[in-house]
Image (cartoon, grey):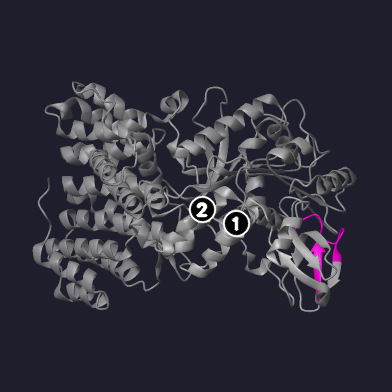
Amino acid sequence: MSRGRGPAAGLLRARTLVPLLALALLGTAPAGAQELVTRDGKVHTGHVFPGAQEVRLNPYGSSAPEMTLGIRTFRARDVQEVREDPTPAGFRRQLLALPAGDVGARVRLLRWAQTRRLRPEIQRAAAEVLRVDAANEEALKAIKGKRKWEALKRGHPVLDRALVLGLRRLLRMESGAARRAAAKRLEASTGAKLPAHLVERMARSLTADRGLTEGIALTLDAAEYPGATYDLFVPADYDPVEPRPLLLALHGGGILRSVDGKVIGSSRDAMAVWLDEARKAGWILVAPTAVEGPWTTSRNERYLDAVLAEVTALWSVDLERMHLAGNGGGGDGVWAYAAGNAARFASVGVASAGDPKGYVGIAQKSGLWLYHGDEDEIVPVDPVRKAAERLRKSKTGSVYCELPGEKHGVPPAAVRDYIHFANPRRRKKPDSPWPLGSFTKVPTEAEVLAFGDPAGGWGLTLDADLGADALVAVLQKGQLDAEPAARRLAAADGARAAGAPRLRALVKDREAPLRARTWAAWVLGRWRDAEALNVLGDVLRSERDAELLRRAADAVGRIANPDNQEDLRFALRDLSGRYKALKGRTIPFVEYERACRLGAALAMAMGRVGKAAEVQADIEEALVIGILRDRRPVIHRRENGENPTALKAWLAESLGRAYRAMGADPTVRQMLITVLRRDPEPRAAAAKGLREGLPPLK
């Protein structure tokens, strides 16, 4: 879970506290503002900047210390108390900042929610206490007893630890059939509902690329928007079991206005504005390029619907924490799109845009944030100031940020202010106090047509009597049923003769779906198709996707032709280069996992193919010294089933087996053991591999 900026800094207490009964008098406070109480009993609302000598208050709610418009200053000795925003957003801000395992802080948050009568938040706070202290009487009373707590917890996707751990483990199973069986067992033991569409969407997203991906072609409704693309950022620590907030960002239109539907600006412009802060907050960020200019057309609005539908089908998004923001011409697009969709979003952010349109209605349905530079030479600031003043008086919890000396654009200080505003927010009318994952929604017909029926990952959509030609046709689509189709093909008698040429062509086709190429390579390896070696070698030399490379390496190792030794060495050197390029003092688990999995596959393949001393040297440099000897800690979450030690042991055992098969020199073998001298489990695994050698192929 991403962590917001803490309310630990949001509680300033001078010398005495106002009695809790006084809180009942604060019903006139605007939603979403802190409350500064002076010694004369007056209450002032806005964002508070505490200080030893003086306390500053921004009545527009902005957290940007650079803002000067409307700022009020109080002597610190005249301030009696500063209280956190008494709304669900204030609760969330405190919730996100809770120290791990701190029962006292959780109990205080529960009391805070009870005092303000935030009923859904009371349940959430009580649950947070009980997750740490299961016998806490105060929390059990708030949740109406132990029996209620046990009933609430059983099968709950957040509270049931057995369910969460079991789900994370089954998602790492390679076979859809294995995931299906494990899901059924988990349903029986926890009472949860784990339909195919939930499990297989999670499993699919777990292996997808994270980080920044540019120029993704829209798949959903692609025929209606030919050539449409979007950029996507997914945090490295993405976990499909924990739905993430999402920001839909609309790019600006530049200084020139669009003429005859020409698009000015692109998704890269939006990424340049929002990416750094979205990454820090742990959000998913999607930035589409408009299909026509300006953003305010109805066609662009329908296109945004398709982008959101696609991203929420492919990634686990918290539908209660989706956000919409845009700058310049993108801000105009936000006004247009939010007019009919504001209630879908936890917050709406508009920066350096034209005249505000429908802002009062939008602010009533969603958190609204506005920004403008006071020296904007393109779009006048005055209309936005007037809107901000009206919003300040409307008590909707809106925020206005205006930075002095800033011209047209969105400076980093403004983006930080927006994330601070938006991060704790959920939809104004949420369905529950808990995250609402997009994967829980039943797939639409459009999603099934575009990406396949998730039940296909369990083989439930494949007829039992499908022949080889039909199975190849299923595999070529690259949808979720590609894996069960591949497994059926690999086991089918007589399928190789007719199917192998088509699968070779599929692996070679760089325009084909990646899932289709990956499973086609897997089948060719199971068939030990020697004619596929050139195609598989090309994959090892030219592709970047770790899963495709792993399947290709495994296939080459199964076919075991020495002619492919150089292809494997090339892929190994490429893996080494990419791993070395991971700068920093730590390694993200997802990167470590991919390196170990691919490294193990390449080592085993080389054990069957390569004997030369230079091959052993390459392995030693790339895998033993490059990965196994790397002492940087791997950032992981064991509760997610992430186990770097097990990965290291797997790689070490694979290396041991490969060395034995190659007849490696004793010095090379000893180097492997020496590098692992501080790691008992991987060292034992390497020794086992050196004793046993390569296992027989199945």
What amino acid is labelled 1 in the image?
Ala
Which range is magenta? 54-72
x, y (%) of residue 582? 45, 63
The answer to whether residue 177 shows anywhere in this view is yes
Classify residue 249 by image quadrant.
top right
On screen, residue 294 versus residue 437, left or right, reads right
The answer to whether residue 65 shows anywhere in this view is no
Q: Residue at x 23, y 40 (%)?
A: 181
| Cα gap from disc 1 to disc 2, whole angstroms | 9 Å
Q: Residue at x 34, y 39 (%)?
A: 194
Quick check: 336 above or below 254? above
Task: Return the residue found at the far right.
Answer: 382
Quick check: 163 above or below 622? above
**Residue 669 in magenta stretch:** no
On screen, residue 271 versus residue 461, left or right, reads right
Q: Secondary structure at mark 1?
A: helix
On screen, residue 356 versus residue 481, left or right, reads right
Disc 1 or 2, which lies upstream in sequence? 1
Camera-side residue of 406 and 621: 406
x, y (%) of residue 675? 27, 75
**Residue 55 in magenta stretch:** yes
Q: Which residue is mark 2?
A: 124
Q: Which residue is mark 1?
A: 113
Camera-side residue of 528 and 381: 381
What amino acid is labelled 2 in the image?
Arg
Labels 1 & 2 near each other (Cβ < 8 A) = yes
Quick check: 481 above or below 469? below
Camera-side residue of 625 and 501: 625
x, y (%) of residue 465? 18, 21
Q: Secondary structure at mark 2?
A: helix
Q: Which mark is residue 397?
A: none
